[in-house]
Image (cartoon, rainbow, N blue to C red):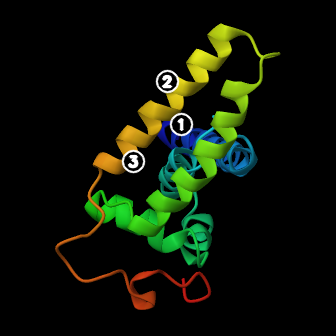
Amino acid sequence: MPFKILKSTQRFIYFCAGWVFLLLAVIGIFLPLLPTTPFLLLTAYCFARSSERWHNWLLQQPHLGPVILDWQRHGVIRLRVKILATALMIPLVTLSLIKESIPLYARISAGLICAGVLLFIWTRPQTRNSSPVKKADIPNPRKT
């Protein structure tokens, strides 16, 4: 009995954490220094351990599911995703670097964080050895 309570509590904590990470990922779409992809990966991790239904829902999302599966299965960040991340990050961070009303330490921090994130993104492989993720590889929540 105590093991069952512990297991359900653990699942509840993972489920709540999954929603917090999903919220942070959505906020990260609009804030240049808050990364979106790591929070999405954490969301997938938490949902996989708490709710098969919500994990499948996340993987079913047309723009997110294949990207998450690429990372989970192969450690790959697609070229299109790298270009999009770079195209969004550089102008927003550059704006903060040239704005004189922002303190110097904040501008330096923003530049270093952006450089670090871009270095990480561009050093990940962009193709995988196996075949691409197909729609059939993504679980259908209606069938589970």
Where residue 52 sits, quadrant-wise, is bottom right
Q: Residue furthest right?
A: 101
What residue would you read off at disc 1? 6
Q: Is residue 37 above or below residue 120?
A: below
Tell me what residue is drawn at x 36 percent, y 41 percent: 120
Image position, residue 73 (x, y; %): 30, 64
Q: Residue at x 52, y 71 (%)?
A: 65
First in sequence: mark 3 vs mark 2:
2
In the displayed structure image, the side of residue 57 where residue 126 appears, left or right:
left
For residue 14, what is the image quadrant? top right
* Mark 2 or 1, nearer chain start: 1
Quadrant the C terminus occupies? bottom right
Disc 3 residue crowd, few under 14, some 14–19, many 20+, Cα 10 Å: many
Residue type at numbered disc 3: Ile
- Relative to 138, residue 10 above or below: above
Q: What is the three-letter code of the residue carrying label 2?
A: Leu
Q: Is residue 34 above or below residue 26?
A: above
Q: Disc 3 vs disc 2: Cβ atoms closer than 8 Å?
A: no
Amino acid bearing label 1: Leu
Pointer 1 with pointer 3, Cβ within 8 A: no
Q: Which residue is mark 2?
A: 112
Q: Residues within 10 Å of mark 1 (few under 14, many from 20)?
A: few
In x, y percent, where is residue 91? 65, 45
User: Does residue 32 appear in the picture of this structure?
Assistant: no
Residue that label 3 marks: 121
As drawn, the label of residue 114 is: none
